[in-house]
Amino acid sequence: MATLSEITRTADNQNATVLKDALAVHQRICVLQHQRRLDEATAMQSEHLQPLLDQIAAQGLISPDELTTALESERKRVDDAALLACLLAPLLADQLGTNTAGLQSSDLTSPKSISTARPRPPPPANIAGFIDEMLSKQKSTGRP
């Protein structure tokens, strides 16, 4: 399988930019599809990716087979990343003390779900409470 670097190594800077842009847009479309945001993915396909693919084809920047291989490679990378996110999110949530029982796998891959799901202790009522809390944490960790 040809990688982006292999394909762009033989192209000049402007052509390499068009190829990189097309692959970046395709990658974003794949992410949207994994998030089940199909309308957005379809719109991005027709509005952003297709013109880039047409430009690549019209200028003969790379062969159709190389382009197909590069697009498939990007899709595989997104698939692998999504799989890793589904596998690692529960492990990270356990370490962070986050309850993931009610979350869907697409929720687990978004940064906001992990940061907002984690319970936070209430702030101290006053400065004296804050100082007491800091002193108790310091004593519990054994720091002077």
Image (cartoon, rainbow, N blue to C red):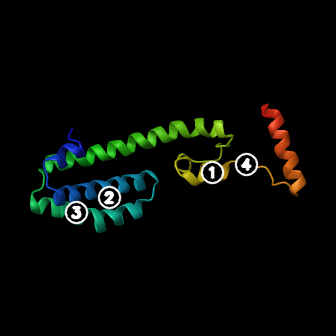
Q: Mark 2 points at which residue?
A: 25
> CB under 8 Å between callouts 3 and 1?
no
What amino acid type is highlighted by mark number 2?
A: Val
Which circle, 1 or 2, is nearer the viewer?
Answer: 1
> CB under 8 Å between callouts 3 and 2?
yes
Q: Mark 1 points at which residue?
A: 115
Q: Which of marks 1 and 2 is nearer the N terminus?
A: 2
> CB under 8 Å between callouts 1 and 2?
no
Q: Earlier in the sequence, mark 2 or mark 4?
A: 2
Q: Earlier in the sequence, mark 3 or mark 1?
A: 3
Judged from the image, the secondary structure of the residue bearing numbered disc 2 is: helix
Q: In this view, does 95 lie to the left or right of 30?
A: right
What amino acid type is highlighted by mark number 3?
A: Leu
Q: Position of residue 8 (x, y in %)?
A: 19, 49
Quadrant into which the C terminus falls: top right
Q: Mark 3 points at which residue?
A: 52
Mark 4: few/some/many CA within 10 Å (<14, 14-19, 20+): few
Q: Residue at 52% of width from left, 48% of height from top?
A: 109
Q: Name the residue under label 4.
A: 119
Q: Which of marks 3 and 2 is nearer the N terminus?
A: 2
